Image (spheres, grey):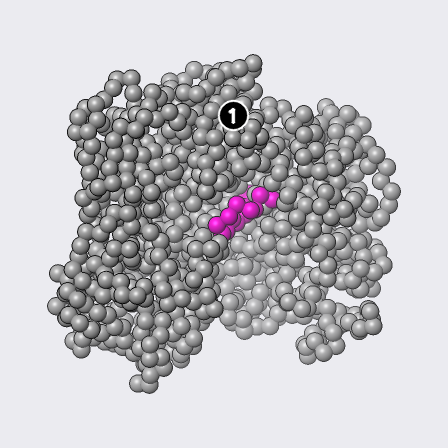
Amino acid sequence: MLDLEKLKNPDNFYRCAPFWSWNDNLKEEELLRQITEMHQKGYGGFFMHSRVGLVTEYLSEEWLSLVKKCIEHAKKLNMLAWLYDEDKWPSGFAGGAVAFKNPSYRHKFLVLLKEDQVEHDDEVLSSFVHGGVKYIVAKRTMKLGDKWFNGSCYVDLLSKEVTQEFINLTHEKYKKYCQEYFGDAMPGIFTDEPTYLRVHYKDIPTLPWTEKLPERFLQKKGYDIKEHFEELFFNVGNYHKVRFDFFDVALEMFIENFTIPYAKWCEENGIMMTGHYMAEDTMRGQIEWIGAAMPHYEYMQLPGVDKLARHLEQVVTMKQVSSVCEQLGKKGVLCETFGTTGQHVSFLHRKWISDWQAVLGVTYINPHLSLYSMRGERKRDYPPNLFYQQPWWKDEKFFADYLARISYIAGLGKRDVDVLVVHPISSAWAEYSKFDDSVDKLDILLDKMVKELIANKIDFHFGDEIILSKYAQVDNGKIRVGNYSYKVVVLLPLTNLRKTTVQLLQDFINAGGKVVALKDFLFSRFELCMIDGSKCDIPLKEKFKNASDLNELVNILKEEVSNYIEVIDKKTGQNAKKIILQSRKLNDGSRIIFLANTDIQREAEITIKIPADNNVFAIDLVDFGVVKIPTLKMENGFAVIDATMYPASSLCLVVSDKELSQNTKNVISGVVFDNSFEYKTGSCEFDIELKNYNVLILDRIKYEVDRKVVFEDCYVSQVWHKHFYNLPEGTPFKATYYFEVEKVPSKLFVAIECAENLDRILVNGQSVKFERKSESFSPDQNFLDVNIGKIDITSFVKEGKNEIVLSGRKSNNITAPGCHERIKDPKNHRPTEVEAIYLVGSFSLICVDETRFIITEPKKPCHFDITKDGYPFYVGSVSLKSSFEITKESSKRVYIKLNSVSAAVAKVYVNGKKACTLFSQPFLADITDHVNDGKNDLEIVLTNTLFNLIEANHKADVFEELYRRPQSFIDFENFTSRYMILPFGLGSYSILTSEF
């Protein structure tokens, strides 16, 4: 049953819980302030996550005490404070302590070597000649001293003893400090990218290994794997069988020795195991890192995945995890998301990704990343930073409410699904080789089929063969797996099935079930010919219904699917492929249908046809309300709805026999039902007001060490990467920044990272000082971030050339992009940075040649794009004021439409009251209730992102890069001296009227 009150204000388990980056010298006052910030913005919790730059000692008494205080504060606010199980990632090494405990705990793997590649400490297991070349198979053990692992190394997660040591060093410590909150304010712990094979070389094949694997293999498979190493690596003999058996055993050992004891510990202690495994996206990735993804999810209380980068490609990933969770009745599906999308990620981009995730089953959004501190390397930690430092943060609450509502919708009732797709990972095991592309081709076939089904509105679950062997049975002519039953089974182009799966399909067909086999429509290479890796005749194939290509498969399945929903593109008369949907059945017979436009560039004019005899209404998930649809028609047992879905829009529909109070509404969440608008008035003239000071970034310096000039004129990115990070601690340095002034501002500040720890700050030869008055962030003392200090230098600046000189001693724990080392004495650590500094004040900028700017008196910039009119680095909000006159008609609604918007978000005020918040096309909203007959005052407040100030702005292809990472900031091959700047402004507005 749909509970509208719960949907309007979902509880905290559906609200965002970000990775909260613990990445500096942590202070209780600031930690608690930041928790309150999250609470006020609608977040339901947070994951306390050690990240690059951490100064406070990981798992120390101080760390554990702060964790407890944060859990206590979360409990007061009714939030969920989640633990995270590692110092950075991948999980398992306990910040380095596990490998230091015992040499046998270190990570091991097989290597295939030529004779000149053997290292002195490799343990040779076998050798053979292949193609006239002698190969050696050896066990290699990971060496201590890896910077990423804090001077230690990764560990052997195929060993139960290693997992137990990891739990003793991590989970048991948290239990000692925080057990009273387990299962309450502290609901669970996040494990991040554990793997059975960490090391991958470009030209040396590697495979997972542990000391007990040969014994386990012999016990389970009946032969000695050491005698069949050649088949593991080369296509000789019965190689399909050997590889299937090998990965079957390796996966089983990983699950039994890591996943099960981890999940069992969580269950016994009343908390949930959540997080995600490494490389879930492709079958090749799964084989090389974790064996297979889906079997692990069986044991996790809250399984999850990660969704990184600015694209929607990971359909297989999402369907793998949601299939298991829905079949086995898990608490939900977590997704670590938004990471690496860049500082310019906006409400629009996050909605685009989140709507797509919701359709595919995600119920718990774990945003990546909210930074405790942005100083130094921390600001480059796989951006964006989704926290208080962003200018749009003040508007986050309304969006957090929206994300909570789609998460709640995604978990209601049961998915309306009739199709089971057998996952082909066992075929990939049998085919896997570093030396050919068979698995890659299987991945392509899988990806294409999955996307085609989703695009054609044919929902499905994956059936993992291991899970099917435990939970599947034929029941009343259907295959039942846990909570779901399926009318039809689909086999992709594959080569292998497990014996248990073949028997299941035989029973299903005997009971009248239909199995549809898709032929290899791309490569004409793969067909079912093996059971458990052994080639054999499979008479059952004769009873399959064959589909020669994707079109035929789709047409067959349309006939089998109950309650098939059509979404037709009006321009083509064909299926609108970019619109995807999920339909869910509630226990009272109602259905919820959630549609998302996955195209972020173009709108789609569509007709939706839903089998329905009952009421159909929409729910506005942004402004919230039950909506009567103006274009709804009931025709021959179908509800027919015309609509235009604009880029990244979504639509929530409910089919129910219940009557609910409804208001007719024509525009919701980027969807317009009736586009019959009449233009009344508008303007492109505004009175513009800047809500924040302007900013000039100074990122070129003269850099000296021990009184010797190292770089005469150099960008700071080259300095910290090529020199500063490698300096011995305590080395004296000097950084000189230059800027030009045509007109001295009435107020000018310099903002400097870790300003209080410098030996001296000189402005034109005169000493200035930053005095920190609070350990917590304050706009009076800080610019953007708790560790960027602000100093008034108005009286020290002159017309002409100016210089700022920073002198200090290197004190920094960053060793490389994304890497840090532990601080021996955190309490007395006084960090220094060589980074860009910022001039902040009441000025505008004269652009000399796109690389050089001169400070001059402030002016009102052009509203079309203030970045081109003196404010290229401005972060914050601008107010655009205007007025319009209109004669109100009782039968017409009044709308405002914003044109040519370049901003993260726009708030519209009419006659002094907020009328709407807009962040996506068509930037259209009903403002009738705020409009007077006659003259009306209008204010539009635009807000941007941090992109123009602290992104990889000297990377020439920054706008094309989908995956932002620390290395993006040192991509000197694509370096440009120009600043890559996003526009910020508004073209005009229009006042429209409509019948609806």
**Mark 1 nearby-residue class (10 Å; few <14, some 14–19, many ≥20):** some
Q: Front-most of 943 and 687?
A: 687
Q: Nearer the viewer, residue 812 or 382?
A: 382
Is 482 located above or below residue 183 in the figure? above
Q: Residue at x 78, y 62 (%)?
A: 234
What residue is shown at x 33% (from left), y 46% (from top)? Answer: 903
Look at mark 1 in the image and give the residue it sits on: 608
Residue 287 locus on image (x, y percent): 67, 54
Instruction: Give how far across and how far down residue 417 sits, in percent.
Output: 61, 30
Q: Secondary structure at mark 1?
A: strand
Question: Quick one: 236 or 216, which is closer to the camera?
Answer: 236
Check the image and report above or below for 361 versus 839: above
Say whether residue 883 is left or right of residue 104. Answer: left
Q: Is residue 321 magenta?
A: no
Residue 341 lies left or right of residue 164; in this view the side is: left
The picture quadrant where one finds residue 601 is: top left
The stretch of residues the image draws in magenta is 300-316
- In this picture, residue 68 sits left or right of residue 470: left
Residue 833 placement: quadrant:
bottom left
Judge whether 422 appears above or below 130 on screen: above
Q: Position of residue 408 (x, y in %)?
A: 46, 34
